[in-house]
Structure formats: structure tokens, C-alpha cells
Amino acid sequence: MKVPDLEYIRWAKALPHADINLARSGIDRCPASLLRLKASELVTTLPVTYGYAPLRDAIAARYGVTRAQVFELSGGTSYANWIACVAALDGCGRGAEVIVERPTYEPLLRIPQALGHRVRRLDRRFEDGYAIDLDRFAALVTSRTKLAIVTNLHNPSGARIGMPALRAMASLLARVGGLLLVDEVYLECVFGSRPESCVHAGPNVVTTNSLTKAYGLDGLRAGWMLGPASLVARAGHINDLMTNNSVAPGEQMALAAFRRLRDLDRRAHGLLDPNLARVRAFFAREPRLTAFIPDGGNVVFPRLPRDVDGDRLARHLLARYSTLIVPGRFFESPRHVRLSFGCSALRLKRGLENVTRALDDLT
């Protein structure tokens, strides 16, 4: 196995301070007081087993699955994606093929490459609103396909894959013994109807998630994987070679978060819903940017004018306006940028105004 450097992650960890940060992938950090934890609950040890049973039960209840279908772990969705891929591809040999969407979150492409498998790309096109083209997907599925990986909501665009499309994808993969992995960490940001977990799209569907993007609890690194009980058990055994056990205080805090999800939802809902309306209004009056506007989430991925690329705009925004955005190069789309709107209304307003000013400077 050859582990590649992750260019996007390295860039994100080296970001300088800026007055306005529209480059974050999650909403503003949640205050610990919302968890309403007692000092007695911050333990330093828990029973050594395959996950903390009360937390697994809370996750199972939230998503309508059994405890045996839940693997909770420290490391957030990032580590859950790694474990899910290793478990799904365990024993497949080097002839296995993995379908990965494009554009995508870089680690989801690099993991199967690091494991030595052939990757085939499923294009999600800007012109189609980043929808899944089922005919295009079917053409990629072969007898060697062991896994397909997508994000829902799509990272970086925020586009949602409906349950009918997910079921169709799962069915196509089932015919060749393949699995569908859905990173649904942004799906938590669709608060109005609380959408059904993608795990219910078929018996060969695996999902990964965490408390990070929608709730601002990224420091907990509380992640989980949902899927077939046999695959979940295999993931636990693989984890025995890796971290073995999760962090006890983190598991207790994650359990507290699940018990307070109504409060956490309310806080996030109060940030994201009005900000999405502000984002819509901004793109309606900024003709130089063309954007697919998602129904939820906390990111948007506009296309820039032809004479401006994402890196140039990002550098100028930081240097002149102390504003951070993500160049689309990190998502295989140099003419795009990713903007987050999971911040305060004032910071979003100022950040979007700065984007307009930077475009005035550069065009």
C-alpha cells in the first residue's frame, strides 16, 4: 500500500488566520454548554468492546437500524470512510474496481487508490445540477466492480441524491456483488424533513456520518458507519489492528449530543436556513458567478468567469480582504470555488460582499 499526500487536507491545516472564514466545511463550533454534561459523565474509561453500547443504541434509534448495523468510532467520518473501504474491499485482490464520483472530496478518491484498486470515475456534471446519471453509472459497473463511492449531500456542491436513484444504484451493484458507500455527513444539514438515511436504499448500502458538519462538534471526532451486520462486524475486527478502542470522554460527549439533538438541530437550523436564503439572494444579483443552489447543506460551489480561476480569486480574497474560500482545484474543478455559509449572518454578509469586491478587482 502506498499512502498519498492529501493536498486539500494539508492546505486546510495550514490556513492562516483571516477575519472571515468561508472555507470551513462545517458550521460554527457548538458551545459545550449545549450538551449539558455533568462532571461525573466525563469518564476516563468505558467497557472495552466493539463500541459503547448506549451510543450505538442511540445512533441505531436515530437512523432506524439495529445495533448490529452500527459501528461507532473515534476519528469522524474521515476514519469511518477509511474503515468502510477497507472492510468492503478486504480480500478482493488487485483486480477489484471502485467507482468514485467526480468532483469529489479528495480522501474518497485516494483511499481506494492507496489500497491498490483500479478507480473508475462517475462524472456529476455542473450542467446537470450534479445529479447522478444512472445510464452513465450503469456503463461503469462491471463484474469486477466491488464498491461505488458517492457523497450525499454532494461535497462540494450540496446536491442531493434522491432515494429512487440510490436504490437504482444499489440494485445495479447488487447484480455483481458490489457495495454502495454513501458519505452522508452533509445530509444532516437538511433539517426541514429530516431525510431518511441512505442506508435504507438497499441491503448492500453502507453509510458514514458524524457530528461534525451539521452540528459544529468536529472536535469530538465522533463518527459512525451503518451497513450490513456482517460488514460492520468485519470493520470492528479491522479496527482492532488500528485504534482498537474509541476515546471514552468523546463517546460520553457524543451520547450527550444525541440526547440533545433537538437543541443542536435548533441551533444549526437557526444558522443555516436564513443563510441559505442570503446565499440565494447573493447569486441572484451577482451575474459573474453561476451556481447550483442546493436545498440544504452548508456549502455552495459556484463557477467563476472564464478569466478567473479559483486559486487566483482565493489568493486575492485573502491578501486584500482577509477572507478565506476553498479553490475548486481541490475538488477537480479549477474554475470553481467552494463557499461555506455555516457562519454568523454578519460574517456571511461581509464575506459575500468581499467576493464581489474581489471579482471587481480581477475582472
Image (cartoon, rainbow, N blue to C red):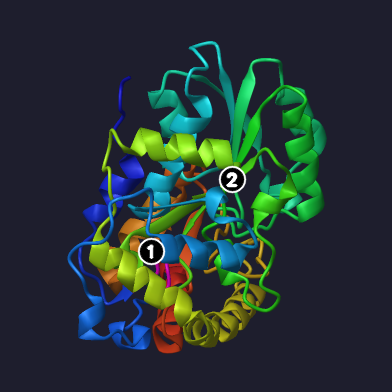
In front of the other: 331 or 98: 98
C-alpha span from label 1 to label 2: 31 Å
Which residue position holds label 1?
Answer: 23
Q: Which mark is residue 239?
A: none
In front of the other: 45 or 95: 45
Amino acid residing under circle 2? Gly
Identified at 54% across, 55% down, the residue is 67
Residue lying furthest left: 44
Image coordinates for residue 28, horizontal then vertical, percent:
37, 77
Amino acid residing under circle 1? Ala
**Circle 1 sits in a helix, a strand or a loop, which is it?**
loop
Foreground mark, 1 or 2, reads: 2
Q: Height in image: 236 above or below 254?
A: above
In front of the other: 88 or 318: 88
Magenta extent: 21-27
Query: Taking the image as drawn, is residue 244 in sight?
Result: yes
Q: Is residue 51 left or right of residue 292?
A: left
Q: Is residue 171 left or right of residue 177?
A: right
In front of the other: 284 or 224: 224
Quadrant including the N terminus:
top left
- Quarter of the image where one finds residue 107: top left
Q: Earlier in the sequence, mark 1 or mark 2?
A: 1
Would you say residue 25 sits in the magenta stretch? yes
Which residue position holds label 2?
Answer: 227
Q: Height in image: 113 above or below 133?
A: above
